[in-house]
Amino acid sequence: QGRGGGVIDGVKVPVVRLNLGEIAEATVVAVFPVCSAEDKSKGVEEAPWEYRAKGDFGIVEADKGWKRWVVLPAWGPVMGLKEGGVAVAFSDAKALPWRVNRWYKEESILVVANRGRKEVTEDDGFYLVSSDDELKIERGATLKEKGCTETLGSVAIVVRPPRESNDELSPEDWD
Amino acid sequence: QGRGGGVIDGVKVPVVRLNLGEIAEATVVAVFPVCSAEDKSKGVEEAPWEYRAKGDFGIVEADKGWKRWVVLPAWGPVMGLKEGGVAVAFSDAKALPWRVNRWYKEESILVVANRGRKEVTEDDGFYLVSSDDELKIERGATLKEKGCTETLGSVAIVVRPPRESNDELSPEDWD
């Protein structure tokens, strides 16, 4: 799970870097509906709830039509999400509550959240919330301090883009 | 391309068997909108035209919402289909115009068609047509004889289900 990525110390959410060809090394893949962070909580709430792969060909059947989908390798935290999962595409990593270096911050990230687990239960868990009309990731402990008990969903995994796919990276990203 | 499958003699459409874990061996995968053969030509025509994988995460962005999608390995004929492709799910292989053995006939198949190539050009090409209100695959030569010049699309590949996934096969399928 999470080759090329890693778990940040004390952080209970896997942060992985998608390797080109990794979708590959898995026997199975997971398909999730995607919404943009710009669509805010509305996007998260509207994305299909069901998207199970069925039958011989693993055809994904959603409970409603949806335009954007992503295929992820069969990482553990992702495969556990049989329904209610959604991938939120952030254009940069500023939404993360932990310190990241500059170019990590400038990378796009994909946050897979479990809408079936909205309640803040774990202090060291991470949750997707709408704060000041922006989607953000917050620690359970921080939310509890603020008296926030319900979120948009718990964070299952944070995916960083492949390192080699540099078509869309400008030279200064490689400082 | 098409490991575990094969090209039938004289037939210009690859027929492949999907191997479990094959999605795997590919560096890239292809995602197609799926319609059921039961939805007839309406399903084929209504499926999204665009479904290109974009950006760092290869997020598929369709030009309209759609409920059913399938992930296929990066087989050549499939990767060439940048837009206009659609996967039609048939519950058995009776729609194919060539002779198949009994249990092949009882297998479900997935036919990936190119809606961007509707015109009957190749005698030995295969085309998706609606005949007697049923979706079928026909040879170019047969269609030309009938005077049919336009189809729903040319057939890019025929996919047979994985052999090992026998959950949905009854014992007699293994005669």
Image (cartoon, coloured by chain):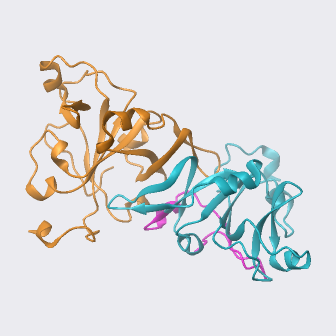
Chain colours: A cyan, B orange
Residue A24 part of the magenta-drawn span: yes
Q: Which residues are magenta?
A: A1-29
Q: In the rendered view, would you say B116 is above or below B108?
A: above
Q: A106 or B88: which is nearer to us?
A: B88
Residue A6 part of the magenta-drawn span: yes
Prevailing SS of the magenta stretch: loop
When asked about the image quadrant of residue A14, the answer is bottom right
When asked about the image quadrant of residue A142, the answer is bottom right
- Left or right relative to B18: residue A29: right
From the top left corner, tell me how far across and down residue A30 is, in percent: 51, 63
Any part of residue B127 in sight: no
Q: B24 or B161: which is nearer to us?
A: B161
> Which residue occupies 45% across, 56% down?
A60
Any part of residue B77 in sight: yes
Q: In the rendered view, would you say A41 is above or below A119?
A: above
Query: Which quadrant of the rendered structure holds the N terminus of chain A?
Result: bottom right
From the top left corner, tell me how far across and down residue B102 is, in percent: 9, 56
Q: In the rendered view, would you say A148 is above or below A160?
A: below
- Left or right relative to A27: residue B169: left
> Which residue occupies 84% across, 55% down?
A134
- Left or right relative to B75: residue A123: right
From the top left corner, tell me how far across and down residue B62 is, in percent: 55, 40
Q: A87 or B3: which is nearer to us?
A: A87
